[in-house]
Image (cartoon, coloured by chain):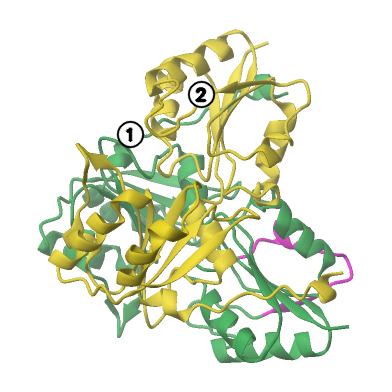
Chain colours: A yellow, B green
Amino acid sequence: PRGFVQLVGAGPGAADLLTLRALRALGEADVIVHDRLVSEEVLDLARRDARRIFVGKKRALHCVPQEGINTLLVELAREGLRVVRLKGGDPFIFGRGGEEAQALAEAGIPFEVVPGVTAALGCAAQAGIPLTHRDAARMLTFVTGHTREGRLDLDFAALARPGQTLAIYMGLTTLPQLRDGLAREGFDPGTPAALIERGGSPRQRELRGTLTEIVARAPGWAGDGPVLLLLGEAVAHGALPARAEAAFA
Amino acid sequence: PRGFVQLVGAGPGAADLLTLRALRALGEADVIVHDRLVSEEVLDLARRDARRIFVGKKRALHCVPQEGINTLLVELAREGLRVVRLKGGDPFIFGRGGEEAQALAEAGIPFEVVPGVTAALGCAAQAGIPLTHRDAARMLTFVTGHTREGRLDLDFAALARPGQTLAIYMGLTTLPQLRDGLAREGFDPGTPAALIERGGSPRQRELRGTLTEIVARAPGWAGDGPVLLLLGEAVAHGALPARAEAAFA
């Protein structure tokens, strides 16, 4: 049989935020190639006898470099296997899914991409924070807080413009640099913000305040999970969801 | 019993891009309040005897104004019903879900928000176009091509900045205005672009080229479905998925 690869978005963490298409892919896979951002709860939905290969990436501990992952996917497919490359969130948002797709296409391996709920959407839904708002934010910008030689490498002039919500996939340590970079471009540090840990998972936590307050309080608040910062006037238009557990029962 | 409301993202169109959580909500709802962007295929997953209320919005034919929808949701919940407010894509991206959540919170109605795969992610996955790319786009911006008094009302200076992918939820008629507005801010009209119709649904179609080419060819190409424009250097890093039908069989 001919092998193939599905690049599958696992969503933000909770197993029931997987799409039906992703669930089917997991149920049919011979091998699952996954990284650290994929939760155990999601992995448990895979076919029982599917082989699991962990390739991923803890900061400062790149288990397998991207080129190695590309090669691995090609080789597994050439063995005739149904391969699921399972990625946190959506494969095409900060997940290097594009590079994997190109490598597969170049090698002549059939593949498809199954989109997923990206982390910011999972965070926002659970926290009741709209990402766009008629009056407050008609633009939504996703960016990663990656650093280059220890410095946060972002287009602060673009990010500081009004009328948008920023969703920043980042680490905690660069928060002060983010505040300073934005402030240099005239961004109001009193802008509403929410820092969200383990977003979209059952263990989501939120820290709310102005950007100034968040930067000050984050070090004492944060655990060891990935965080996401939502920033902009729309954050103040949130409404805390209240699951009426009695009603659901 | 106490009523409650779930604001549910229906995803981009294909029924199997619904999340498991959304599917469960549909299966338990007494009443579904939906708009035009939700496909029949998705509605068919609802409980058979659930009442369906269509509230939505065709351009130039606002069946029910937003305030009316807010009131409707509150009233249905007060009747003790399980209400699903079903929205195309994700409830918190250009869907006015924030306004509905606030209205529910103010009325003391329990609610939750179920995120969905927003249209741009569905389009990109199916077209094999990465939304971010290490070399080409480290920022991703979502914007709607809404008009104010016939003029496209966008922050062109922000959108024209390099290093980002733009995902523009828009109508066809304003494409020339978009090109001109971006060009005035120094944006290269030779930038790779893809216009996607009925994105994320089984009937997705794509028109690829530079922004200049797309604007010229779109009028003769487009059908009557909603379109989305992906614009930026990352678009050129795509790789067309090829579902090996034989392998899948």
Label 2: few (<14), some (14–19) or many (≥20) C-alpha neighbours in 10 Å: some
Tell which of A11 and A111 is nearer to you: A11
Classify residue A17 as left or right of residue A128: right
- Residue at point 59% right, 61% down? B115
Label 1: few (<14), some (14–19) or many (≥20) C-alpha neighbours in 10 Å: many
Task: Please state which amino acid type lies under the numbered disc 1.
Answer: His
Chain letter of disc 1 in the image: B
Q: Position of residue A96 (x, y in %)?
A: 40, 34
Task: Please state which amino acid type lies under the numbered disc 2.
Answer: Val
Classify residue A223 as left or right of residue B189: right
Classify residue B68 as left or right of residue A46: left
Q: Is residue B24 above or below residue A240?
A: above
Q: Is residue A152 above or below residue A241?
A: above
Tell which of A36 and B227 is nearer to you: A36
Secondary structure beneath label 1: helix
Q: Is residue A75 visible?
A: yes
Which dot marks residue B206? none
Give the farthest residue toward the top: A79
Mark pair 1, 2: CA separation: 23 Å
Which span of residues is magenta-colored?
B38-54
Give the farthest residue toward the front: A220
The nearer-to-camera label among 1 and 2 is 2
Which dot marks residue A55? 2
- Per the image, the residue denoted by label 1 is B237
- Residue at point 41% right, 27% down? A61
Any magenta on residue B212? no
